[in-house]
Every structure is written in C-alpha cells, then in structure tokens.
Image (tube, grey):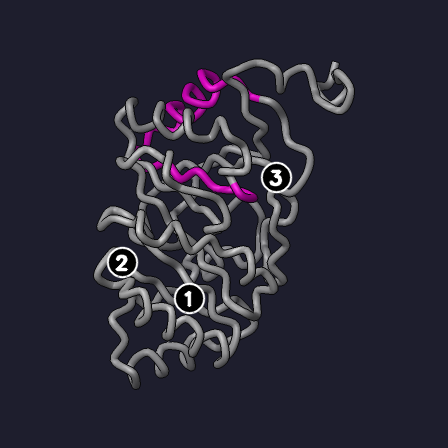
Amino acid sequence: MSTDALHVGAEPLDALAPDRLRLTEIFLSVQGEARSVGWPTVFVRLTGCPLRCQYCDTAYAFHGGQWWDMDAILAEVAKHGVRHVCVTGGEPLSQKRCIGLLKKLCDAGYSVSLETSGAIDISDVDLRVSRVLDLKTPASGEMHRNLLSNIPLLTPNDQVKFVICNRGDYDWAKSMLLEHELDSRCEVLFSPSFSELPARELAEWILEDRLPVRFQMQLHKQLWGDAQGK
C-alpha cells in the first residue's frame, strides 16, 4: 500500500515514526553551486517548502515524495560511494527531523552541505555542516521571508548565496553585503538567475565594484539544462 494512503486525520502514519523524513529523491550528480562545485555529490532532496520564489526550479519537490527511515537514507547515500552529500529541497529545514539527519551524515564521515532558504532558524544545525544560506532578493518575491537573525550565526564554514535577477537585486545584495559585513563572516556567492540575467553582465558589475564575492554560475545547468535530478 502506498504511504500516501495511510493517514491518521491529515497526518500519514509514517510521519509518526521518530526517524522518518519525506523525500522527493536521492541521486548522484556533480555539485553545480557553492564551495564544493564540481565534486561528485549525493543529493538528498527533502519534500516541502513554505516559500514560492518566482524563479524556483524545484517546484516538483513542493508536494508528494515518500517517507524514508533515516537508516535507509544513510544506506542509500552510502551506495553511491562518494564523500560529499548535499541536503536540499524544497526547504529541508521545514522538516524538523532534518536536523537529526544532518548530524547522522556528519557522524558517518561525509562532507555535508545544507541548502536552505534563510527563512528558517539555522541555530540547531550541526556546525560541521556547511550551511548555504540563500538570502532572497527583491525579485524573488520572497524577500520578506528572510530571517536576518540567522546572519550572526554564520561561521567561516558557511556560505551566503544571492540569486540575482536584475540590477535592483544586485544593488540590494551589495547593500546587504556591506551592511552586515558578510564577507567577514563567511564566503559570499553571487549567482545570475538562469535565463533572467546574462551571466557576463553580473560578472562585470562585480568587477566594476570590486566586490569581495565569488561569482558563480550553475554548473549543472550548463551541463544538463533544466533537467530534473541533476
């Protein structure tokens, strides 16, 4: 029987187990973003997200998915035989048990990163995890969801990412960079929104302003376009 058919009220029975998470997919690919770009990486994509960014490329992870035991997740990750693991979504921290999964992955010896929107408190995330905080720009439509209390929690092991859609986004991100001295806390990444802003244009703005940020493009989209599961 499908897990989707098992319910107590509105809550699937599987959700009552203390070590289960709802997953959209687990797959092996090349990391396309952030500090570990280029490394073969296992992606653990959790289901669900409270945000609706206008450029979202993983809307298929908003709903559905299957319930997995944490031990089964770790066993599936181990099958791929690589050391880098990225827990992503959706918004993975929208499932509280994500915190426990991250700890178990670190305990197993993986190099673990977490892709999070920045709209949910990161204080309980294991400090061995590289937290990639995606601060939402005005053009994302979700800027009001940014939880700025996360910024003082950042360490040199973490990263802040800005997806830039236009010049207004760039100017806003630059002001956030300077106001919060983000580059003194962690690595800062500026990325053009795929198909919305020419990458060269963003690179030239960064060079003109001599910003202490790392320009990046989504490597996986250069390789596979908008294909899901890459």
Residue 176 screen position, x and y as percent: 38, 69
Residue on which disc 3 sits: 48
Circles 1 and 3, Cβ within 8 Å, touching? The answer is: no
- Give the amino acid type for the residue marked by disc 3 in the picture: Gly
What is the span of residues highlighted in magenta in the rendered image? 68-91
Q: Which mark is residue 191?
A: 1
Mark 1 or mark 3: whose residue is earlier in sequence: 3
Q: Report helix, strand or loop for mark 3.
A: loop
Q: Earlier in the sequence, mark 3 or mark 2?
A: 3
Q: Secondary structure at mark 2?
A: strand
Q: Residue at x 35, y 26 (%)?
A: 103
Q: Residue at x 21, y 61 (%)?
A: 184
Label 1 to label 3, Cα distance in Å? 24 Å
Element assignment for label 1: strand
**On the image, numbered disc 2 is attached to which residue?**
187
In the rendered image of this protein, does residue 148 appear above or below residue 229? below
